[in-house]
Every structure is written in structure tokens, then in C-alpha cells.
Image (spheres, rainbow, N blue to C red):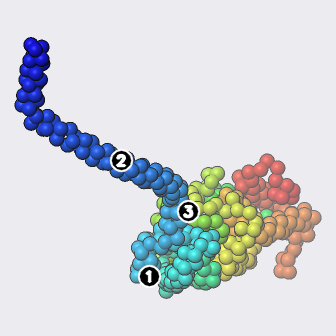
Amino acid sequence: MTQDTRSASEVGQRSLFYHGQAKDFVDLHEQVETSVNLLDSLESFLSTFQKDLSSVSGQISELQERSKDIDNRLKSRRRIEKPLSSLLSDLAIPPSLAVTILDTDVGEPWIATITDLERRLDILKVRSRVKAARDLGDIAEGLRIVAATKLRTFFLALLQPIRTSVTTNMQVMQTSIFVKYRALYVFLQRQAPNVASEVQKAYTSTARTYYETGFRRYVRSLGWIKARTPEKPESIISGNGDNGGPYLDQDRLAYAKMDGPSVILAYMADDKTHEEPIEAILRSLFLVLMDNATAEYAFIAAFFRSESFAPPPAIETNSAIFSPTATVLSPDIGFDDRRSNAGSEIGTHVSRPFSGDGHGPRDVTARPGFMDKTERAPLDAIWKQILDPVLEYCKTFVTTVLEPMPPAVPLLTMIRLTEAVITEVQKRDCPPLENFLFTMRLQLWPAFQKIMSEHCDSLKKLAEGRITSYFSRATSTTDASVANICNRYVVMFNSFVILTDQEEETMIFSK
């Protein structure tokens, strides 16, 4: 009984204990249910998140693919960026270029502008398969036409001062303006040949008139001076020695050299008392001709030569190309009194209009010596068109120098002068003038040979006692006449030796 009572007591106590904890168990149960519900919700959320994460992962992969594609396209465009930029830069016509050509007068800014325009014109022709180039072709052609029209007017206007007055200094025009704007003429040569040809013909006509007028006046002045000092040849047997006979005149022999006395100025002819020997007159004419003819040839070679290649980025005018201090050709005040210096391998005798000066040599953009015959031919033709009247005046004057025939020594002096001028012209590389001077030299030598033959014949006749005239008896040979002949021979021989540089000169001493 006792055990049953204990068991019942324990059961009762347990029952009371659980009844006391019932509320806690209910709360615990509710918490467990709540936790289960939360776990179910979290499970659902995680399941949804996993699906969203899978979707995002797919989008990221797609974006990565797109990123790679964009990167490849960017690299491709970067590779063509520079060529495309260069193409657009070349094809596009800057507004500043169009404004300069359309709205401004020709001036220094045009030099760079025209060079740029020609470069773009060439590029448009090369890129003719590009649609943009074809679209810009009409605009570029319009600019070319406007530029050619304005340049034609510009160059023709530059010639107006030379046409209106012979006192205009052509050398200054050539060196300060024409050479400076040569890039514009080169543009016309390549892009508007007809206009370039018109400008060339206009210059040729103007320069021809300029030189023809100047030399006509100068030769006329020299003719007046020559008429005041007529000099006829005397036979080696003439005279009796009473007046002392001839003597060795070193001053007159000096006219055989380039670096001799000053040239004769045109205004000196106005002084009716001014006289000059025939050698000095011819020397002045030849030096003036050489200076102007070689200077003109150098300018023609520098300005009118043809260029088939693209123009350089810029053309600078070097003051050493041509000297801007050239003298002015004036029919009133004559020609500049300057001397010619010889002795330089490159020519220290500066080419100036109707003058000679001993300053540094003139250089040109393209020296004629570096051109072949094909390139020279058109330049020689231009030079001949300009200088033909001048050469005719000089040729006629040389003919008058030989009528009447001058004495042997002055004649040889003029021959040596001609040879010295030819040597200088060869250094300056002016073949047309060189050919002309060779012709003059060949014209002087027969005259010299003729007069020397006359001297020899007169001596033979004297030795044979056959010197007679219509109004006198045979000339008798006396000691005085023999002494006079010997004196004349000594003076002539010494003069020939002074005038002869070569050790063996058969044309001089063959007689």
C-alpha cells in the first residue's frame, strides 16, 4: 500500500508539475510553429533568390559578351581613326582658305593658301573614287578658277609700271616681287597652264620693250661719243718720226680686262667735250650687255622653269638670290657708274640693269647649269624673244666700230675684251649670250688679220721700193723713216705681248 500511495503521490506531483508548465509548453509550441513558418518562408525566399541569381548570372554573361563586342568595335575604329581623320582633313576645305581666295586681294597670305589649295586639289583628284571627294570637286574647281583669275590680274598689274616707264627698276621688281610670289606662278603652271602662258607672254613683251628702249638709247649715246673720236688705222710705214711717233699706252690696254676702268654712262654723251677711245666704248657696251643679259637669263631660269612635282610647303625668298640694290635704268641720268670685277670662279661680277658692280655673286633658285637641254630650250626661247632687239643693236654697233677700221692694237684690245667677257658669261652659264659673243669675236678676228696683212704688204712694198701714190713719187727710205717703222713695230709688238696671255698665240705672231 505504501508503494501504491507513493506512486500515486508521485504521479500527482508530476501532474501538478506539468499542469504548472503547460503554459510554457504552449508558448514553446507556438514558438516552434512560428520558427517552422519562418523557415518555410526563408526556404521560399532562398528558392526565389536562387532563381533571380541564375537570371542575373545570365544577364551578366550577356553583358560580358556585349562588352567584348563593343571593345572589338572600339579597337577597329581606333585603327581607322587616324587614316579617316587624315582623309577628312585633306578632303575638307577650311573656311579660312575659301575666305582668303574669295574675299581678299592677292598678297603674302596667298603664298601659303595657294600651296594648300593645290595640295587639296591633287588629293581630290587622287581620291576621286571617294564620294566626299566627288562632292567637293565642284567647290574646289570653283576656288581654282577664282584663284587663277585673280592671279592673272595680279601678275599683269605687276608689269604695268615697267610698261609705263622705262625708268622703273626691273631688277627690284624681279627680286622683291616676282621671285617672292613665284609659288603663285607655279600654281598657274600646273593648275591653269593657259593663264601661265598668258602671263609669260605678257612679261616677255614687256621686258622686250624695256630692254629695247634702254639699249637703243644707250647705244645711241655711245654712237655720239664714238663720232667725236674718229680713229683710222695708220700704216706701219706712215709718218717720218718728227712728232715722236706712237707710244705704249697702258691705259688703253687696260680696256681689254673686265676689272678695268668704269663703264661709260649714258648721260656723259650730253657733254660735247667728253671723248673716249673706241675700246672703252665697246667695253662699256659689252659689260652692260653681259650684266643685263645674264641677269635676265638667271631670272628666267629661276621664275619660268617648269615644275611637274608637288610644290614645297613654303618658298622662302633669299636675299642672296638676287640683289635688290640694282640700279635704275633711266634715259635721263644714264647708267650707274660701277665697275666689273673678274677673277671669281663663280662670278663676282654682279648682274645689274645697265651697270656693273663688284659685290657678291647672284645665285638663283635653280641654277641653269643643273638643267638639261630639254629644260633649257623653252628658257632660251624666252630669253631670245626678250633680248633679240638688244643683240641686233649691239651687232650693228660692232659693225660701225669696224667702219672705218680701227688700228691693230685697239682692235686686238677689243678682241681680248670679248674673250674676257665670254669667259665671264660661261661662268654665269648663259649659253645664248655666249653664242652671240662668239659671233662677235669671229667678226673681229678677220678684221684684225686684214689690217695686219696690210701692214705686212706695205713693208714688202717699201722694201721693194714700190710705195707710190697718184700725186707723189716713190717713197724714199731714210734713216728717220726706218727708225719710225721700228718704233711703231716695237710699240705694236709690246702691246701684243701685254695683250696675250697664252705662251703660243699663232693668230697673233704668225705674221
Q: Which residue is mark 2?
A: 47
Q: Along the horizontal axis of the image, is 3 left or right of 294?
A: left
**Residue extending furthest top?**
2
Q: Which residue occupies the foreground of this view, 505 or 151? A: 151
**Judging from the image, what secondary structure is the residue with disc 1 in?**
helix
Q: Secondary structure at mark 2?
A: helix
> Which callout, 2 or 3, points to the residue nearer the camera?
2
Where on the picture, by quarter, is residue 269? bottom right
Say if mark 2 contacts mark 3, CB within 8 Å. Answer: no
Residue 102, x across and y down, in percent: 44, 82
What's the residue at 24%, 45% (across, down)?
A: 37
The residue that disc 3 covers is 312
Q: Which residue is mark 1?
A: 102
- Mark 3 falls on what kind of element? loop
C-alpha separation, residue under disc 1 versus residue under disc 3: 23 Å
Q: Quadrant of residue 105?
A: bottom left
Of residues 360 and 392, the one drawn nearer to the viewer in this rendering:
360
User: At 68% across and 65% down in the image, what residue appears?
Assistant: 430
Residue type at tag 1: Leu
